[in-house]
């Protein structure tokens, strides 16, 4: 759980999702629309000084910002996401998804209504957010292609656990998105998280946020030292795409576990993310993984016809503002390797 590049999109929250809620502890949960779905981490579980003041406490944290739980949908094994937002089972049956009628919020409390209207938070609300809490994208490497992308594959190793995790959430992912200028863009991403579904490392796959809806499947557990392969593949070369035009896949090569789902790509995919670090509720550097960096390596990118793009021009960026906790953020990028430091 993907998230959109917050520097360029007002509704980006920057890879999040969910954790258990235990009454009487600092973790608080919300019930997703699907009673069988994993329970998602709520805004109320974040440090009061680290969350936007205007976001409702019962909203859930996703890799794309803060959402009402009713607009975040869990896909079961074998299910796929259709163009109309319905979910299809392996036997061909469908379950519909109710329209999202509530707004979502970015990391700084910017409100995005279901009709796309954007409302910036009041200055007084911004002041109530702790100036040094990390919430959102930290660093990444990306580029926008001039040809439709058919596949990105990245490998990375699950890092050490944070030495002092508290209630922090860490996300690592690669992914694809439509054009930077596409107002209806969605992001497809295989996401490694710490703290998203309780303490520990997990993998999920996400597609967000057409019509204000967010979809994911998983999680499955992974461990420090496991090798992860994250893949986003698309056959979409022109609008409209078809229902099964894209697949998001997470693979733990160490333990031979995998998770995938098919979805509509909606439009051709041009924006390429080789590696991203996103985090929430970080008030101290010890809440990042203890290994201080993650390397996304052997990155390969192909066009829609399967031709290898020889030198993807990944450009590294530090996304965390200078007012956030500073933990030696930087990104090193080459055509086949992206390292995010923290």
Image: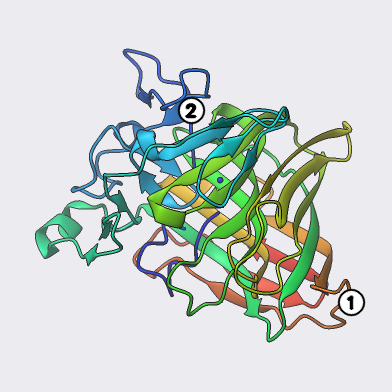
In the image shown, does 180 or 304 lie closer to the viewer? 304
When asked about the image quadrant of residue 27, the answer is: top left
In the image shown, does 225 or 204 lie closer to the viewer? 204
When asked about the image quadrant of residue 42, the answer is: top left
Which x, y percent locates residue 30? Answer: 36, 25
Which residue lies under the disc numbered 1? Answer: 307
For label 2, the crowd category at 10 Å Cα-Cα, with few meaning under 14, some 14 to 19 and many 20 or more, is many
Residue 111, placed above or below residue 62:
below
Answer left or right for 19 relative to 305. Answer: left
Q: Nearer the viewer, mark 2 or mark 1?
A: 1
In the image shown, does 74 or 129 lie closer to the viewer? 74
Q: Secondary structure at mark 1?
A: loop
Residue 330, placed above or below residue 15:
below
Which x, y percent locates residue 306? Answer: 88, 71
Which residue lies under the disc numbered 2? Answer: 19
Q: Residue at x 49, y 60 (%)?
A: 137
Q: Residue at x 31, y 53 (%)?
A: 105
Separation of marks 2 and 1 at Cα, in angstroms: 40 Å
When asked about the image quadrant of residue 32, the answer is: top left
Q: Secondary structure at mark 2?
A: loop
Which x, y percent locates residue 301? Answer: 81, 71
Q: How is the image coloured?
A: rainbow
Answer left or right for 219 relative to 30. Answer: right
Which image quadrant: the C terminus? Answer: bottom right
Which image quadrant: the N terminus? Answer: top right
Answer left or right for 156 relative to 130. Answer: right
Dot placed on the residue nearer the N-terminal end, 2 or 1: 2
Q: Residue furthest left?
A: 124
For label 1, the crowd category at 10 Å Cα-Cα, with few meaning under 14, some 14 to 19 and many 20 or more, is few
């Amino acid at each position: 759980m993907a998230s959109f590049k917050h520097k360029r999109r007002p509704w980006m929250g920057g890879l999040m999702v969910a954790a258990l809620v235990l009454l009487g502890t600092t973790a608080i949960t919300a019930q997703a629309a699907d009673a069988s779905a994993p329970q998602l981490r709520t805004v109320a579980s974040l440090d009061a000084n680290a969350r936007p003041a205007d976001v409702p406490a019962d909203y859930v944290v996703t890799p794309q910002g803060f959402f009402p739980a009713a607009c975040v949908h869990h896909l079961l094994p074998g299910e796929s996401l259709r163009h109309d937002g319905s979910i299809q089972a392996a036997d061909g049956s469908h379950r519909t998804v109710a329209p999202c009628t509530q707004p979502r919020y970015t990391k700084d409390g910017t409100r995005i209504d279901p009709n796309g209207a954007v409302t910036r938070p009041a200055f007084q609300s911004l002041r109530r957010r702790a100036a040094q809490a990390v919430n959102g994208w930290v660093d990444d490497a990306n580029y926008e292609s001039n040809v439709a992308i058919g596949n990105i594959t990245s490998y990375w190793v699950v890092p050490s656990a944070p030495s002092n995790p508290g209630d922090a959430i860490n996300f690592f992912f690669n992914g694809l998105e439509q054009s930077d200028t596409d107002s209806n863009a969605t992001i497809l991403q295989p996401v490694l998280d710490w703290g998203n579904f309780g303490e520990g490392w997990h993998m999920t796959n996400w597609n967000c946020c057409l019509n204000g809806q967010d979809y994911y499947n998983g999680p499955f557990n992974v461990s420090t030292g496991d090798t992860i392969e994250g893949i986003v593949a698309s056959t979409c070369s022109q609008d409209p795409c078809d229902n099964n035009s894209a697949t998001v896949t997470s693979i733990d090569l160490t333990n031979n576990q995998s998770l995938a789902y098919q979805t509509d790509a909606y439009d051709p995919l041009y924006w390429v993310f080789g590696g991203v670090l996103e985090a929430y509720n970080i008030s101290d550097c010890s809440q990042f993984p203890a290994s201080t960096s993650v390397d996304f390596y052997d990155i390969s990118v192909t066009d829609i016809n399967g031709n290898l793009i020889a030198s993807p021009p990944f450009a590294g960026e530090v996304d965390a503002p200078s007012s956030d906790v500073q933990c030696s953020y930087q990104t090193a990028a080459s055509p086949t390797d992206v390292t995010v430091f923290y």
